[in-house]
Image (spheres, rainbow, N blue to C red):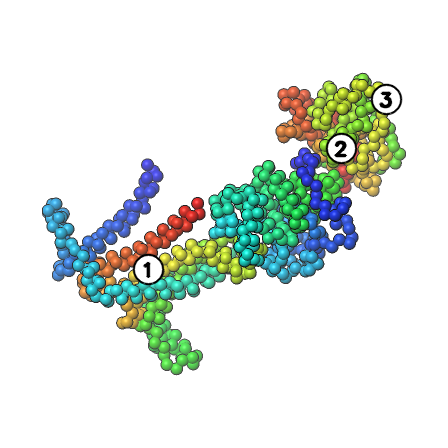
Amino acid sequence: MRKALVIAVPYLWLLALFLVPFLMVLKISLSDVALSIPPYTPQLDLTGGLAAIGEFFSQLDLENFVFLTSDDLYIKAYASSLTIAVISTFLTLLIGYPIAYAMARAAPEWRPTLLMLIILPFWTSFLIRVYAWMGILSNTGLLNQFLLWLGVISEPLEILNTNIAVYIGVVYTYLPFMILPIYATLERMDGSLLEAAEDLGCSRLSAFWLVTLPLSKTGIVAGCFLVFIPTLGEFVIPSLLGGSQTLMIGKVLFEEFLNNRDWPVASAVAVILLLILIIPIILFQRNEQRARELDQ
Amino acid sequence: MAETAAKPKPKAKPMPHEGVFEPWNDPNAKPLIEFRNVTKRYGDFTAIDDLTLNIYEKEFFALLGPSGCGKTTMMRMLAGFESITQGRILLAGRDIGDVPPNKRSVNMMFQSYALFPHLSVWENIAFGLRRETKDAARITERVEEMLRLTRLEKFARRKPHQISGGQRQRVALARSLAKAPKLLLLDEPLGALDKKLREETQFELMDIQEKTGTTFVIVTHDQEEAMTVASRVAVMDEGRLVQVATPPVIYEAPNSIYVADFIGDVSLIQGKASARPETPVPAPPVSPTEDPAAKAAPAAMPEVPVASAAPLPDGRAPAPNVMGEWLHDKVLFPILGRRPPTPKALSAPDKAPAVPEPAPAPPESGTPESPPELPGGGLAIHWADGLDPLVAVNGDPALAGRTVTLAIRPEKVTISRDKPATDNAIEGTVIDIAYLGNISTYHVEIAGGVMVKAQMTNTRRIAKRDITWDDAVWIGFSATAGVVLDA
Ligand SMILES: Nc1ncnc2c1ncn2[C@@H]1O[C@H](COP(=O)(O)OP(=O)(O)OP(=O)(O)O)[C@@H](O)[C@H]1O
Ligand SMILES: [Mg+2]
């Protein structure tokens, strides 16, 4: 009984906070635009009895999904979002791993401080931090002024409102999500394993490849997911730092909802986005499962 | 503990040449490892203190000592994981101070095993081999051999977290053995194994050592293990070597109370030493009842050393004496039952009473035989006012006039209801009896509250034994049974 209750808690949580909202969005995506509040039809009217419910379901269709395929803006936006998410996840890993490694290698008395420094940016608003990057990256911004002063460049670099600014923004924002899980696995690692590897003839470098890296795999995978998933739907960073040519599905979603007030299409975009995200998550879990089964 | 050391060793020590393997006694032998005044400090804590030691090729060198005395630190310095604060370590004549661990022909089995959790048992064992060869067939062959040796064939595909602690230990052992290094460091390699498997693995280790000529340095908390496998044993205390010697010497002739106390079980009796005359003195008069059996017994005396030497080469077990023969029938069957009883039991009554031949005890053996007269020399230890001094003919006369400690192993002490005819006999009370299955240890309190342990083989069922708690008893031991140590 108690066990059932314990198991029920996360499921109820999932039901209330994920499944129900998802079904609502799914329903809207199958509706039609209307000049009303809320801006779509049909509306579910439970007072009308079974007949009204049947009527309601008969009006739902896949029209909006068909529309998404007809306009290549959406396909391009998905593809571009995926590209940006993959590249920035990779960049974040490239920068985050050495930082996590250095932290895990630091003297134990320093580690809480370092951890603190990683978390510190969260204490200021995310929006303000992104605006700060606008100040840094703009043509008259700090970075260009500094480079001009150094004499490295004679013309200000065009960084703001390009994809480069988006990558900088994403890597900056999501770096802690990469560092923390990797740090956790590295810190947990038994130092004598490296000694054993060296004892058995490994150089420092090959010990890293053969022992440290495989053992931090779970941290790397977790970190990559923590960066990839929010980046895919990211809209603040591309709208503030990206240019007009920066196409990301989060931005499209935002515009459909608020500028076009086309909730059904926006919901269809959101449902597809979710499906795109669910596939890698399921693949990842199945992979883990298989690895575990192989272990047995 | 003590009985373990008395057990016959399962196998002879490796003897690659004719005669005994004792390179440490050969001034021309070149040591494989030389510690030269090595000191290791962690901050202001000294873990290894000015340690000098030679370990020779093909040795099986055991490090013994209490927890935290620096055994692992020594190993780690040899393997290259710990820098040396002062002094030098030479491996095959070469200073290894700045040779990185992966360039030393040394393999170490870690106290924590340090198995790679992401690799299977098979891959763990193959890890070192893969670093030195690409030859898959050779690797497979060697790994299979190691798996067989450590009986892990069934677990080859499992990951370390899917096997038991003892199996993990065997994987660690197999992995360190796989590369067949010149020097193998084993940090408590067999601690997690059950007794039977441990003994078999000890046997295997000695076998491997004999076959490959690998030099082993082994850390162990198990004295029996050290005694069984080691060519030499080093007893450490707080980063220093207290004694380095062969197992029999460590056991029979500890150089300090610390070693005597640390190795095996020992009773310590303190007293003031005085020199004994060099000429033999008459034995203390044999006490109580004159029994025909007691008279008849001496005829069997010459047989005693032979009979006792065969099954127990170290001669540490109690041997019957005049009194003992008498007691054998009356009281002390458990002691005497330890040796083959037949020759004495049958022959004694047949032989005519004869003047006993003095059978001098060999100086190293501690059999509590009672020769009719004591050899001269040695020390008399005045341990309690108004009582006879204890005689230790092997005591160093230089200690005369000093306060000394007589260290004596429980298995060399007999216990009886009546005063025994041994060189030394002390009256006492049984305080405690520890039943250990095959033997029992009697804790006897003697004058001055000193506790002495006496051991007896349990040849009788518990219910039949007639010495019990609070009994007034006599303990006895020979003049050569103890070791006199400077107190
Ligand atoms: N990295 C270190 N920093 C400070 N002190 C240390 C360090 N490593 C070991 N020591 C200390 O050095 C001493 C010797 O340690 P070592 O590990 O050699 O003991 P040991 O003889 O192997 O003990 P055990 O039998 O418990 O394994 C201990 O007192 C320990 O606390
Ligand atoms: Mg240790």
Mark 2 vs ligand 1: CB below 8 Å: no
Q: Give the residue at x 13% y 60%.
A: A34
x and y, in percent, of residue B445 in the image: 70, 29
* x 77%, y 49%: residue: B25
Which quadrant of the figure contains the N terminus of chain B?
Answer: top right
* Residue bearing the label numbered 1: A230
Respond whether the residues carrying marks 1 and 2 are from the same subunit. no
Subunit that carries the residue with mark 2: B
Report whether residue B82 is seen. Answer: no
Residue count near mark 1 (Cα–Cα under 10 Å), binned few <14, some 14–19, many ≥20: some
- Would you identify the image quadrant in which residue A198 lies? bottom right
Task: Tell me which amino acid carries mark 3.
Answer: Ala
Look at the image and tell me whether residue A36 can be seen: yes
Tag 3 residue: B354
Q: Is mark 3 on a helix, strand or loop?
A: loop
Label 2 sits on a secondary structure element that is helix
State the residue at coordinates (21%, 61%). Answer: A266
Q: Mark 1 lies on which chain?
A: A
Question: Disc 2 designates what residue?
Answer: B309
Label 1, label 3: how many angstroms apart (C-alpha)? 104 Å
Callout 1: helix, strand or loop?
helix
The span from disc 3 to disc 2 (Cα, nearest Å) is 24 Å
Q: What residue type is labelled 2?
A: Ala
Distance between the Cα atoms at labels 1 and 2?
82 Å
Above or below, B180 against B424 in this view is below
Q: Say which chain tag 3 marks.
A: B
Q: Which numbered mark, 1 or 3, is in the foreground of this view? A: 3
The residue positioned 69% from the left and 54% from the top of the image is B33
